[in-house]
Image: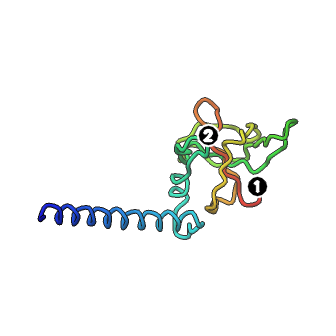
């Protein structure tokens, strides 16, 4: 009987611990998802982004370029135009000249409820020039 009581106690304790941890994690994640980035650095925001189609990281500032100009392609696709004139070196990124265009695959468009603190459309480009993520501003 003592073993059954002890087992039930351990199961209850484990459930309480898991439930508490899950509640904390959910609350912390909800705070960020609600766009509460006040006080958070842009670096934290970059690091939090996840590719919508794969669940992998969008990477970071070294893979990010501002692309405030866009066009609509002949098939209705979004074409992002690099407008970023910031220095590449402090971001440890390769140079992609302003005016370079990238077609944004629809599955790479992030539809996140979190606010984009940069004030720019941000495109994340992999080393092989593939689009990792497209994070539009609220207007973009």
Q: Residue furthest top?
A: 128
Front residue of 124/78: it is: 78
* Residue with the mark numbered 2: 132
What residue is drawn where x is 56% and y is 70%? 38
In depth, the one of 5 and 98 nearer the eye is: 5
Alpha-carbon distance for marks 1 and 2?
17 Å
Identity of the residue furthest to the left in this view: 2
User: For the residue labelled by badge 2, is the local secondary structure a helix, a strand or a loop?
Assistant: strand
Q: Position of residue 84 (x, y in %)?
A: 69, 47
Q: Position of residue 127 (x, y in %)?
A: 58, 32
Question: Where does label 1 land, which residue?
Answer: 140
Q: Position of residue 60 (x, y in %)?
A: 54, 47
What residue lies at 56% left-to-right and 41% top-to-bottom? 54
Residue at position x 55%, y 58% from top? 42
On the picture, is 19 further left or further right than 29?
A: left
Disc on the earlier residue, 1 or 2: 2
Numbered label attached to residue 111: none
Q: Quadrant of residue 95?
A: top right
Quadrant in which the C terminus appears: bottom right
How many C-alpha atoms fall within 10 Å of the one at disc 2: few (<14), some, or many (≥20)? many
Asked if residue 52 is positioned above or below residue 14 in the image, the reply reads above
Number of numbered discs visible in the structure rendering? 2
Residue 109 as seen in the image, left or right of residue 89: right
Query: Residue most toward the front?
Result: 1
Tell me if mark 1 has few (under 14), some (14-19) or many (20+) residues whose alpha carbon lies within 10 angstroms of its own: few
Please report the residue visible at 76 percent of the width from the left and 43 percent of the height from the top: 81
Do labels 1 and 2 touch, CB within 8 Å? no
């Amino acid at each position: 009987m003592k073993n059954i009581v002890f087992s039930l106690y351990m199961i209850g304790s484990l459930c309480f611990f898991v439930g508490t941890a899950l509640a904390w994690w959910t609350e912390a994640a909800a705070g960020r998802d609600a766009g509460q980035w006040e006080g958070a650095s842009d670096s934290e925001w970059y690091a939090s982004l996840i590719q919508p189609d794969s669940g992998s990281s969008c990477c970071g500032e070294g893979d990010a370029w501002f692309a405030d100009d866009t066009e609509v392609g002949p098939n209705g696709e979004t074409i992002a135009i690099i407008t970023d004139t910031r220095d590449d070196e402090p971001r440890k990124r390769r140079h992609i000249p302003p005016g370079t265009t990238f077609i944004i695959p629809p599955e790479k468009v992030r539809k996140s409820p979190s606010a984009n603190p940069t004030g720019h459309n941000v495109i994340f480009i992999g080393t092989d020039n593939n689009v990792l993520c497209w994070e539009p501003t609220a207007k973009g």
